[in-house]
Amino acid sequence: MKNKPRVIVITGAAAGVGRATAKMFAETEGAHIGLLARGREALEGAKRDVERLGGKAIILQCDVADADAVEAAAERVEQELGPIDVWVNVAMTSVFAFIKDTTPAEFKRVTEVCYLGYVNGTLAALKRMMPRDRGHIVQVGSALAYRGIPLQAAYCASKHAIQGFMDSLRAELIHQKSSIVPVMVQMPALNTPQFDWCKNKLPNKSQPVPPIYQPEVAARAIVFASKNQRREIYVGLPTVIAIIGNKMFPRLGDLYLGKTGVKGQQTNEKADHDKPNNLYEPVDIDPGAHGRFDTRAHPHSPQLWTDLHRNWIAGGLLAAIVALAGVFFFDRSESR
């Protein structure tokens, strides 16, 4: 069993963080992966990537807002690939607009995908993992799960909802003495195609708030989360600053984002409001994992490396302290 590839399900696997994560699971462990998303062409591209890198993949074309479709996808994974070891919820959409310009239908749709889609995936995973009493459920969150920003109220609210949902899930699993590991990975600004896919009502094209990281940085954190028992992982120093800063100085965050958040999420290029978006239907192209900000995106995060290796670092520091203490006491005994 130890040599058997793990079975992974990734929602939103067609592009962005989901695509990068699928590739990393394939490359690092030859995983068998259920790729779940709406766009067929991008899913086909993700499948080719996984198989080229040594993994195995099946395509599961469905909308995560449809609970029955997610359940059917999970059943097919277990029939074709085997028992699910890891379920990763990544699927997202958003609307870049002021609250006053966002319709109730748009708020509903973002919530159905970005929050209820995670609930649907989690329920499908729990149904299969609980009888076996094992598995990891990884929720891809954001610094916006703690700190809302202007122009993305629906998305921020969904991430806040996932955070509350996870608190409840963790407590219930502890009560049930379950070995299932739920973990939420909080992300920084990432260079993904979402800024060309998501609906934009702003005058200019949307962009992530710098500093920007490549989606592979996120993928490294997700793969790590799937093998360890962390409650939560913060990715990137800006995420740490945003979350801790908001806990300590929320009013300062309001003022700062009120002055900088609107301009900071727009480029100088005019938006094309007739361009297709993925709010209700997939934009059926294959953009891959990266967006259009490669020249500005960081491929590594020293903060994340330190966090993921903190046990080794702590062990090394402890060994150094013990060694120094040994030298000190040896010198003292020699001088007597």
Image (spheres, grey):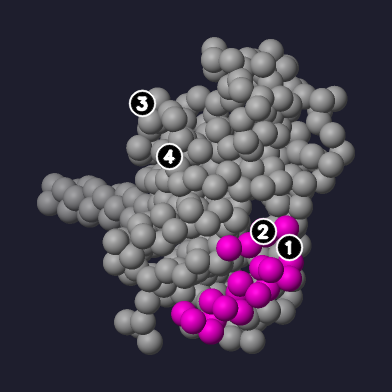
Q: Distance from label 2 to label 4 (Cα)? A: 22 Å
Looking at the rendered image, the disc whose residue lies closer to the viewer, 3 or 2, is 2
Q: Is residue 303 visible?
A: no
Q: Distance from label 3 to label 2 (Cα)? A: 32 Å
Please name the amino acid that badge 2 sits on: Asp
The mark nearer the N terminus, 2 or 4, is 2
Q: Is residue 277 visible?
A: yes
Please name the amino acid that badge 4 sits on: His
Q: Is residue 208 magenta?
A: no
User: Which residue carries the number 1 mark?
Assistant: 66
As helix, strand or loop, the secondary structure at mark 1 comes to: loop
Residue located 42% across and 45% down the image: 288
Does 299 appear above or below 57?
Answer: above
User: Which residue carries the number 4 mark?
Assistant: 290
Label drawn at residue 16: none
Please state the horizontal and vertical placement of residue 202, each as a whole percent of the image.
69, 21
Q: Residues within 10 Å of mark 3 (few under 14, many from 20)?
A: few
As helix, strand or loop, the secondary structure at mark 2 comes to: loop
The chief SS type of the magenta part is helix
Label drawn at residue 63: 2
Please state the horizontal and vertical placement of residue 125, each as a whole percent of the image.
63, 73
Residue extent of the magenta highlight: 61-81
Please name the amino acid that badge 1 sits on: Asp
User: Which residue carries the number 3 mark?
Assistant: 295
Q: Is residue 69 magenta?
A: yes
CB-based contact (under 8 Å), mark 4 and mark 1: no
